[in-house]
């Protein structure tokens, strides 16, 4: 769930709390290596620079901002790969819709680790010729003297959403910086952000802030409090999308910050994560996307997992498995591959850091183009898609899981989804291997029903979702 390397503390003193369900890969290494930045323009790992106001070069554009083993995509290429481009050309661009993103409050500017989100977005929009982002920050829960400060996690969330739903309003809902310190804090932050966030927009995209960790971290009462808040969101016709996690079949630790910052041992437990495991959440898993860098056309897709993850660390593979808290919901009844309890995830999208979308971090004069990954990328992809679907339908679709599974059992399944059938989410903590699950035709506990072809899926969602 969290992309964090303890070694970075040797290079930079971390400001405040470090968030992340998949912090932009390479960002922290770049912070330690001046060779990754240039005096002006969008510095790249190859040392070349491109003015932020320039349009992306043709061909393998975003490669210029990624390292030698990475093939990342521009927003336009991702739009084409997932069938979003035809909708944008018809004016289905998120206009009139609001997506809420719970994010950890940062306290001190310290580029390139912590930047000003407004500067990041200006550089991002200039580089990729996107309309200026509609953003606002809500400080009700956390308060902040510097509300626009953002770590790489927040930048990834916001830029990904803006890339795919460019006219949607993005509300950054700040939660306390201590929200990931322990399960008690995480539950409190999740409940509070769900209650406030569901009054602010029609879609919530939850990557790190608002997550809790493995189901075993909470008791029944805590799980029930989260479910109650999700019921309230459903009544308000709000769609809640949450990342499934980044350690494959292993759940996130209960003390996310301490465990991943080297403050304590991490004992791998085969389990799924809350929030994605709650039946009222659309859980988003991760894939490895193979698309054309000439046209953006989708070629193929497999599970995001090893060797494209980090063995022994908490950034390895698409989270997925079966709940120990929730029985199988009705919308999963009769779905091949499911069991007697809730299966996670429901859907998926690109999460491989070697095939992620290029993101930009800027201090106003110098910008870095970096690749991105983890289910922190796939969750906002799906949140953007739901915002487009809400606009298409002319109403908030709300709790979409039943409609998603109805489409999967219809003759249109293979037109609306890319069914991912290759790969697994086995995790390795040498010498221990935690055997995960295999991708398979139809739904599986690694990539769910697959990734979207939005030009087919969105009209179907508008038709199947209960009015």
Image (cartoon, rainbow, N blue to C red):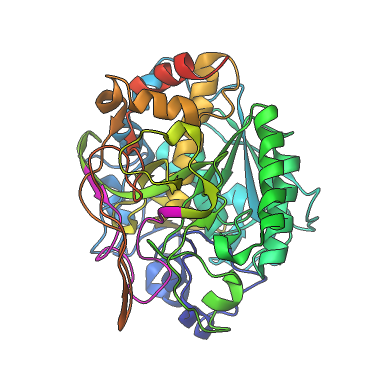
* Left-right relation of 77 to 367: left
Q: Nearer the viewer, residue 300 or 159?
A: 300
* Relative image position of residue 124 (x, y in whole percent): 48, 45
Stretch in magenta: 301-322
* Relative image position of residue 1 (x, y in whole percent): 48, 61
* Relative image position of residue 52 (x, y in whole percent): 44, 47
Q: Nearer the viewer, residue 267 or 154?
A: 267
Write the residue at 29% across / 57% down: 354
Judge whether 264 appears above or below 129 on screen: below
Q: Nearer the viewer, residue 407 or 293?
A: 407
Write the residue at 56% across / 60% down: 215
Q: Give yes or no for residue 305 being in the magenta stretch.
A: yes
Judge whether 271 appears above or below 386 on screen: below
* Left-right relation of 451 to 198: left
Q: Is residue 181 visible?
A: yes
Q: Quadrant of the C terminus?
A: top right
Q: Is residue 357 visible?
A: no
The image quadrant that residue 149 belongs to is bottom right
Q: Main secondary structure of the magenta part?
A: loop
* Left-right relation of 213 to 37: right
Write the residue at 67% across / 69% down: 182
Write the residue at 24% across / 66% down: 307
* Left-right relation of 310 to 116: left
The image quadrant that residue 442 belongs to is top left
Q: Nearer the viewer, residue 270 or 339?
A: 339
* Relative image position of residue 261 (x, y in whole percent): 55, 78
């Amino acid at each position: 769930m969290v992309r964090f390397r303890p070694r970075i503390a040797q290079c930079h003193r971390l400001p405040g709390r470090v968030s992340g369900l998949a912090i932009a890969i390479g960002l922290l290494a770049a912070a330690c290596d001046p060779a990754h930045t240039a005096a002006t323009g969008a510095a790249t790992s190859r040392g070349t620079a491109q003015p932020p106001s320039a349009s992306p070069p043709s061909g393998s554009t975003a490669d210029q901002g990624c390292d030698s083993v990475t093939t990342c995509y521009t927003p336009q290429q991702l739009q084409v790969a997932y069938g979003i481009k035809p909708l944008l050309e018809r004016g289905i661009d998120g206009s009139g819709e609001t997506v809420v993103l719970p994010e950890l409050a940062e306290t001190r500017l310290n580029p390139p680790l912590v930047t000003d989100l407004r500067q990041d977005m200006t550089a991002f929009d200039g580089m990729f010729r996107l309309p200026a982002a509609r953003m606002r920050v809500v400080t009700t829960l956390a308060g902040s003297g510097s509300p626009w400060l953002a770590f790489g996690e927040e930048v990834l969330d916001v830029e990904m959403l803006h890339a795919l739903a460019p006219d949607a309003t993005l509300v950054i809902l700040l939660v306390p910086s201590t929200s990931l310190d322990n399960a008690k804090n995480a539950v409190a932050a999740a409940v509070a952000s769900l209650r406030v966030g569901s009054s602010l927009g029609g879609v919530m995209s939850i990557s790190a802030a608002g997550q809790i960790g493995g189901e075993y971290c909470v008791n029944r009462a805590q799980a029930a409090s989260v479910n109650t808040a999700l019921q309230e969101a459903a009544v308000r016709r709000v769609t809640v999308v949450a990342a499934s996690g980044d350690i494959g079949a292993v759940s996130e630790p209960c003390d996310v910050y301490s465990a991943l910052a080297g403050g304590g041992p991490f004992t791998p437990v085969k389990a799924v994560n809350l929030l994605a495991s709650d039946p009222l959440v659309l859980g988003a898993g991760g894939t490895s996307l193979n698309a054309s860098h000439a046209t953006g056309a989708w070629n193929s897709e497999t599970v995001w997992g090893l060797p494209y993850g980090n063995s022994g660390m908490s950034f390895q593979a698409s989270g997925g498995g079966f709940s120990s808290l929730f029985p199988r919901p009705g919308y999963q009844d009769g779905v091949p591959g499911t069991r007697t309890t809730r299966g996670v995830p429901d859907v998926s999208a690109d999460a491989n850091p070697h095939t992620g979308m290029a993101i930009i971090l800027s201090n106003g004069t110098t910008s870095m183009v970096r690749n991105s990954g983890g289910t922190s990328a796939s969750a906002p992809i799906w949140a953007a898609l739901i915002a487009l679907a809400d606009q298409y339908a002319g109403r908030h679709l709300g709790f979409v899981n039943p409609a998603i599974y109805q489409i999967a059992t219809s003759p249109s399944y293979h037109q609306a989804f890319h069914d991912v059938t290759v790969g697994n989410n086995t995790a390795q903590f040498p010498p221990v291997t935690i055997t995960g699950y295999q991708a398979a035709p139809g739904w599986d506990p690694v990539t769910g029903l697959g990734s979207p072809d939005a030009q087919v899926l969105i009209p179907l969602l508008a038709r199947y979702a209960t009015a």
